[in-house]
Image: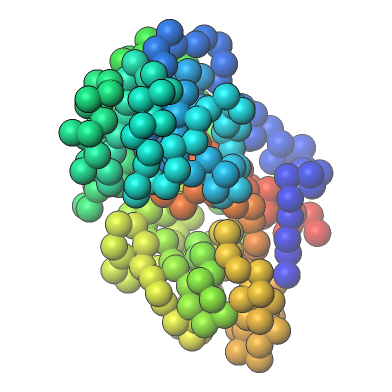
Amino acid sequence: MPQFTRRNLLSCTTAAFLAAPAVLRAETSGKRVATLDWALLETLLAIGADVVAATELRQFRQIAVTPEVPEHVTDLGLRGSPNFEVLRFARPDLIFNSNFYAWADPLMSRIAPVESHAIYSPGESPYSLAERATLAIGERLQLSTARKMVEDLAAKLDRLRPLFARGDGRPVLPINLGDARHFRVFGSDSMFGEVLKRVGLDNAWTGATSYSAAAPVGIETLASMPDAWIIFIPPHPEDAFRSLTLSTFWNALPAVREKRVLRIGSINPYGALPSASRFADFLAEGFSDVRNG
């Protein structure tokens, strides 16, 4: 199975597309900010906001990976049950929240003003919502780096279209493994699906989704999409992954026999523009490695 890391040497053609930095540090906001939401956290970090508190930072570092979380950021605990006393001690000037954690707004508003931005909402484009939220947050914090991130990512996705147009034209199936028998698949209304569309690739999953993904889906469903590239998006249980790849069913799939499987690096599955950019980079690297390998 093709597998790659960011240490792989890219072809000159691909490297030219991947020039945008993960974090923009041209300026720093004077406001101390906090958030419960990971999509907003990665956005704030990427535009150089002064983040003082956020949730589940150890898991964020493992799953989202980038942008890097500074050591001084206070961990508020679980996203579903944050420690509001710790949040108070962090002394934020402004708290950014999303529709997923709207229940916490009345409690957090006693600590600092709360501003809400939705990235994932049924029937709406998460990419467009992420662009809108990024620009609004940048304006609120007076950080021009927000608009630069929006424009740079849009330009990168446009530049990637010719690269993918030279591929085999097969659809792509982005999945996250739950166990050896089930996976979560990301539809056209997910951030991953939006990136595929914007670089000219088709999503092989045409079924219904709930908040951008469908789960659990039986592993036997992969047999119904024999022409697709399968993209494994961590995190997933390594023992489940090993069990799956050793199974007779898995090794009989056309995608496996024809080496149309990519295992990429971990990405926040419900992220914002930084996650979209990371996914685009991994796709470009992966398909470049396949062509050059």
User: Does any portion of residue 81 appear in the rendered image?
Assistant: yes
Q: Residue at x 49, y 36 (%)?
A: 75
Q: Is residue 172 left or right of residue 261?
A: left
The image shows residue 277, relative to residue 108, as above or below, that is below
| Residue ranking furthest to the left | 106
Q: Position of residue 100 (x, y in %)?
A: 28, 46
Q: Hey, which quadrant is residue 256 in on the image?
A: bottom right
Report the quarter where the C terminus lies.
Answer: bottom right
Q: Position of residue 16 (x, y in %)?
A: 68, 32
Q: Residue at x 43, y 23 (%)?
A: 90
The image shows residue 189, relative to residue 281, as above or below, that is below
Q: Is residue 1 left or right of residue 213?
A: right
Q: Position of residue 170 (x, y in %)?
A: 53, 65
User: Does any portion of residue 155 appear in the rendered image?
Assistant: no
Q: Nearer the viewer, residue 109 or 232?
A: 109
Q: Residue at x 24, y 21 (%)?
A: 113
